[in-house]
Amino acid sequence: MKAVLRTLLATATTLFGLLFVTFLISRMLPADPVLAVVGDHASQALVDRTRIELGLDKPLLVQFGLYIGNVLQGDLGQSVRTGEPIASELARVFPATLELATLGTLIGVLAGVPLGILAALRKDTLIDHLVRFIGLMGYSFPIFWLGLMGLLVFYATLGVLPGPGRLDFGYEDFVTPITGLMTIDTLLAGDMDLFRNALAHLILPAGLLGYYSLAYISRMTRSLMLGELRQEYIITARVKGVSETKIVWKHALGNIKVPLITVVALSYAGLLEGSVLTETVFSWRGLGLYITDSIFGQDMPAVMGGTIVVGVIFIVINMLTDVAYRFLDPRSR
């Protein structure tokens, strides 16, 4: 119980720090938020009235208190570009990022864990070097360059995969948003052609994120597995004639599953918050593209709202990882 309370207290403190930093940055920026709303050619009377309406005439601590109160009520302000509530816009674009990052992480886990184990078992062989080379490639090449090359080869040259977007041009109007996850919504609509189209559009961007995730997960799995295979109980099990399959999949993998959860969780959080370039290259209407467009449109309230969402995602995933860690490993309680 105490551990749970400590986790909740740490989460609340981190969230408070995140809100304080985002508020401070928004007030330190040279751009005037009032002018961003009313425009450069507004009268002084309109500027003064808007400043009072936004609460910017109050002391900084009072503004921070109002900011905290609004955020806790789910009010992130209004977008300067569209005039819509930012919370509603974020709720509309976030499922696209969630769908992309979840599939990317799934690809990374399903391919990265077996490759990492295989590399550890075949240490210093051709297979080990090949797996490490694949991981190194994932770290070395910029993700936007890989995305552009993927579009050039598979879309523009071979024509085997669709281009940017979540569906072919004009098709998105035929799908009623229910969950915001295009594959799920097309299935709920019972339209298999649209479902196949949505799935095909996922292959390139999710495969790209999956490869990026694979590079990290396979490297960490190899390192963890090598450390475990050197343990004395593994050597003893081999001397007693326990099969290699049982040693690897039951004993060694069972003991590294807890740190592996942390590795996968960090990778997932990284994809959720770091898919900005991928979404930009593939015109994927998710959180990353929303923040990018907001930056170019000097829509600072929207940028701050997106930053808060990204921070909250990271905090929540870390909290869940900590809970899972305590549940699976009694020594950490």
Image: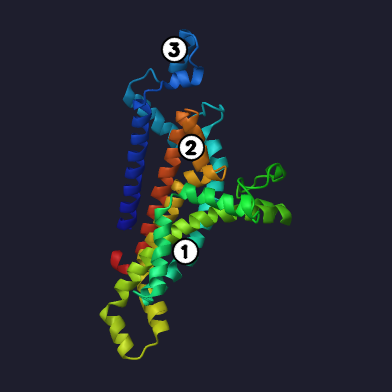
The residue most toward the left is 232
Above or below residue 11? Residue 111 is below
Above or below residue 229? Residue 156 is above
Q: Are marks 2 and 3 in contact (CB under 8 Å)?
A: no
Sequence-wise, the earlier of marks 3 and 1 is: 3
Three-letter amino acid code of the residue under disc 2: Ile
Three-letter amino acid code of the residue under disc 1: Val
Q: Is residue 44 visible?
A: yes
The residue that label 3 is drawn on is: 48
> Whole-percent x and y of residue 326?
35, 63
Above or below residue 75? Residue 12 is below
Mark 3 vs mark 1: give the one in front. Answer: 1
Considering depth in this image, is 12 or 321 the residue closer to the camera? 321
Q: CA distance from mark 2 to mark 3?
A: 29 Å
Q: Residue at x 36, y 19 (%)?
A: 58
> Whole-percent x and y of residue 85?
54, 31
Mark 2 vs mark 3: give the one in front. Answer: 2
Three-letter amino acid code of the residue under disc 3: Asp
Quick one: label 2, few (<14), some, or many (20+) residues within 10 Å? many
Considering depth in this image, is 87 or 269 the residue closer to the camera? 269
> Whole-percent x and y of residue 255?
35, 73
The residue that label 1 is drawn on is: 109
Q: Quadrant of the rendered structure where residue 231 is?
A: bottom left
Sequence-wise, the earlier of marks 2 and 1 is: 1
Considering depth in this image, is 196 or 263 the residue closer to the camera? 196
Q: Residue at x 42, y 60 (%)?
A: 215
Residue 291 tag number: 2
Q: Secondary structure at mark 1?
A: helix
